[in-house]
Image (spheres, coloured by chain):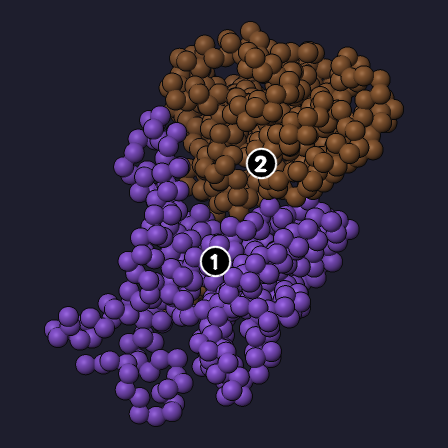
């Protein structure tokens, strides 16, 4: 019976997984994801790319909120910074996408340090409001810096090519998104197992104790903001490549709320939870749409008048039910299921 | 082995192919609508979807277009641009629509524009006819509607010539986005053309709900004619604040205030406000349309009828006429070509006749000015449709 708790060497403690079965399943998943464009249509690919952008954003927020305990409502602002940086560098300056993507991440990182400094003295709701104010400031700056950002008219994103392929549509975009998502998840998983990750967790659990143990709070909090914002900037850039258009309306406050919902629903503090939460919330509207299409007559007036609202209520209801009855989130459910089968027939 | 390797390599470098001219069968034509069906602005999308439905059912009852019935497929975007993109992707890839009538808000249609262009999708934009939609001109996109600039210019011209005192003071309050900017252009043009006294222009952030400071500034400046760039609850809050301060105002409003739901919000402030619009808000044409709608939609849907219904009905009528002219060999290219040459399409008095034969592929630019009468809860026409 494998419990996953017994480790007999330091190597096993820092390994991503010491289970051949886990690696086998990861391999199957990787093959499935590589073959996906040949198994599904463009619409499903579009949804998957959107979900991948959400995964990157949620994993990044999890570093800041789930692991370091710094609540941020500024994700939509950082997404906008990344998306605009990518759009400006691509469309206005004609830089190649292999430069604009890291450029978007680095721009968001630079901006995050400005927000990060006040966060050094703030916690909880105070920090949340500060980061929220930041996203408002960002949208104001975008609107009023017309020479740089084209103001309220937005920017059409074009000219993103990688290895000769147009990475703004179809399977090239999908593979780019897949690479970025895999890179983000790996980076997050590895960071968690380093000194940095452990310092973040210590700060989250008890910052005074962490400081007593010699952890430099200023450095690690700023680092959390910088690293998280880098990946959110990448997510914004990916979003801009997919939409091929950016303006301030694309980056509403709802994105920040949804990002928080994703990591709470998935399981706060866990990379796997952030991934599961992002996938769950990204596909939930589509699952509900298909469900309603199966049980309602699209020609009925009921459908025309109420189905969209009911779908919206169902979306909210699913989240509330999950949070009420499964506070550990999706990853908690997964752990429970795994524990049950590991201990079977002695499970209770 | 080499053959298998080549086949795998071929699979890896080949992209999915697109079908030509989807959405048309021997018996049906699929038209897409991306509407705001949920959220605070849902009444806009619901009104819009009724217009598409009535136009489709009307032509279907008469035998369809060259024997083909129209099927309207509506997708909700909740007024979120990223969701508009996804909704249109679904309409194109899953539902295989032939053309697009509903296009949601300005940012939403811009988010959909790359897909519209890529698929050469015949599209009529009648809900958010902003200049950024037709500047630059996209070959397959046809815009029906006036600019906010002209709608406000028309109202201010009427107010200046027929209503306001010679010493009237004009003020503007508007959102800090492209929509607000367009209103300010119209305001500035009227100020310049009629030499108006306009000491105050105030911007506010989209989503603002408390306008006490802005209105206090207006009061301080002695404003008596207000170009109100707020929409829905925003517009109502501005007028409500003005009433609190007992300001003697003639308000000029955005055409979104020409729908029953908005009028109900604005009425408590007690101002008989003006609206400039490119569709008719009252009169025989509207009554005739309501009678037509009764044949095809439910009582619940009838309640959703608004100016957006007329706009979408006209947009769909334009698409229908262009498709009809193509005959049996219906293609997107032919539909676009026929839309490009569409001239003098009668809308039954719901607007000026549709005419896309100009380089911007823009019609419906003629504006009529209406005044809301609080007592009868109706809009009274002050002018006919005129070009400004």
Q: Is residue A28 left or right of residue B361?
A: left
Chain under numbered label 1: A
For residue B144, side relative to residue A201 (left or right): right
Q: Is residue A133 above or below residue B92?
A: below
- Display colour for chain A: purple
Q: Residue furthest front?
A: B245
Discs 1, 2 touching: Cβ within 8 Å: no
The residue that appears at 61% across and 37% down in the rendered structure is B106
Q: Residue at x 58, y 36 (%)?
A: B105
Image colour for chain B is: brown
Which secondary structure lies at badge 1? helix
| Disc number for residue B105 | 2
Number of marks present in the image shown = 2
Locate residue A149, reporting x and y percent. Answer: 71, 52
Where on the picture, by quarter, is residue A33? Answer: bottom left
The C terminus of chain B lies in which quarter of the figure?
A: top right
Q: Is residue A222 left or right of residue B37?
A: right
**Which percent across, then down, holds residue A112?**
63, 66
Where does residue B319 sit, x and y in percent of width and height?
54, 23
Quadrant holding the N terminus of chain B: bottom left
Left or right of B5? Residue B151 is right
Does residue B35 appear in this view? no
């Amino acid at each position: 019976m494998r419990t996953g708790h017994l480790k007999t060497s330091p190597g096993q403690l820092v390994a991503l997984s010491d289970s051949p079965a886990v690696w086998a399943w990861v391999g199957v998943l990787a093959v499935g994801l590589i073959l996906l464009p040949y198994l599904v249509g463009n619409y499903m690919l579009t949804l998957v790319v959107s979900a991948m952008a959400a995964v990157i954003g949620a994993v990044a927020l999890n570093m800041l909120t789930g692991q370091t305990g710094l609540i941020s409502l500024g994700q939509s602002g950082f997404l906008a910074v990344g998306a605009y940086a990518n759009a400006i560098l691509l469309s206005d300056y004609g830089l190649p996408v292999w430069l604009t993507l890291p450029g978007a991440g680095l721009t968001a990182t630079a901006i995050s340090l400005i927000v990060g400094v006040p966060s050094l003295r703030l916690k909880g709701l105070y920090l949340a409001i500060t980061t929220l104010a930041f996203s408002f400031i960002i949208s104001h700056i975008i609107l009023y810096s017309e020479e740089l950002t084209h103001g309220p008219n937005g920017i059409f994103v074009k000219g993103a090519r990688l290895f000769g392929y147009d990475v703004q549509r179809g399977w090239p975009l999908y593979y780019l998104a897949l690479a970025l998502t895999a890179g983000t998840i790996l980076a997050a998983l590895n960071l968690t197992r380093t000194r940095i990750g452990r310092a973040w967790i210590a700060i989250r659990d008890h910052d005074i104790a962490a400081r007593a143990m010699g952890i430099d709070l200023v450095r690690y909090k700023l680092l959390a903001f910088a690293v998280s914002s880098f990946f959110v900037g990448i997510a914004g850039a990916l979003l801009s490549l997919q939409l091929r258009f950016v303006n301030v309306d694309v980056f509403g406050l709802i994105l920040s709320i949804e990002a928080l919902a994703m990591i709470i629903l998935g399981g706060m503090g866990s990379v796997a939870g952030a991934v599961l939460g992002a996938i769950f919330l990204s596909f939930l509207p589509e699952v509900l749409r298909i469900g309603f299409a199966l049980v309602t007559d699209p020609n009925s007036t009921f459908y025309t008048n109420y189905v969209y609202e009911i779908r919206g209520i169902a979306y909210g209801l699913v989240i509330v039910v999950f949070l009420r009855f499964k506070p550990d989130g999706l990853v908690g459910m997964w752990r429970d299921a795994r524990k049950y089968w590991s201990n079977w027939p002695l499970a209770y | 082995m080499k053959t298998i390797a080549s086949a795998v390599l071929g699979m890896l470098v080949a992209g999915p192919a697109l079908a030509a001219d989807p959405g048309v069968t021997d018996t049906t034509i699929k038209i897409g609508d991306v509407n705001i069906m949920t959220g605070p602005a849902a009444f806009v999308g619901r009104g819009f979807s009724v217009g598409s439905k009535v136009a489709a059912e009307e032509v279907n009852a008469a035998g369809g277009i060259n024997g083909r019935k129209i099927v309207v497929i509506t997708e909700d975007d909740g007024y979120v641009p990223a969701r508009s993109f996804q909704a249109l992707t679904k309409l194109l890839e899953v539902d295989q629509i032939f053309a697009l009538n509903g296009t949601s808000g300005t940012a939403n249609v811009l988010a959909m524009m790359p897909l519209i262009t890529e698929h050469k999708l015949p599209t009529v934009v009648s809900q958010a006819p902003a200049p950024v939609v037709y500047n630059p001109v996209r070959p397959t996109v046809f815009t029906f509607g006036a600019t906010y600039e002209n709608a406000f210019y028309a109202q201010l011209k009427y107010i200046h010539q027929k209503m306001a005192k010679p010493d009237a003071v004009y003020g503007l309050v508007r959102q800090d986005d492209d929509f607000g900017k367009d209103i300010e252009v119209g305001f500035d043009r009227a100020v310049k053309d009629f030499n108006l006294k306009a000491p105050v222009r105030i911007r506010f952030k989209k989503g603002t709900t408390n306008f006490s400071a802005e209105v206090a500034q207006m009061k301080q400046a002695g404003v008596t004619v207000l170009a109100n760039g707020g929409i829905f609850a925003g517009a109502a809050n501005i007028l409500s604040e003005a009433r609190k301060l007992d300001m003697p105002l003639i308000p000029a409003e955005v055409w979104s205030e020409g729908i029953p739901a908005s009028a109900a919000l604005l009425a408590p402030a007690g101002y008989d406000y003006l609206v400039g619009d490119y569709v008719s808000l009252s009169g025989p044409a509207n009554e005739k349309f309501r009678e037509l709608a009764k044949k095809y939609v439910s009582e619940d849907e009838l309640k959703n009828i608004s100016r957006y219904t007329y706009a979408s009905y006209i947009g769909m009528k334009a698409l229908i006429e262009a498709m009809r002219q193509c005959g049996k060999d219906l293609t997107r290219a032919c539909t676009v070509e026929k839309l490009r040459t569409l001239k003098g399409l009668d809308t039954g008095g719901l607007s000026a006749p549709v005419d896309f034969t100009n380089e911007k592929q823009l019609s419906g630019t003629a504006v009529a000015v209406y005044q809301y009468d609080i007592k009868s809860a109706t809009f009274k026409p002050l002018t006919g449709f005129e070009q400004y």
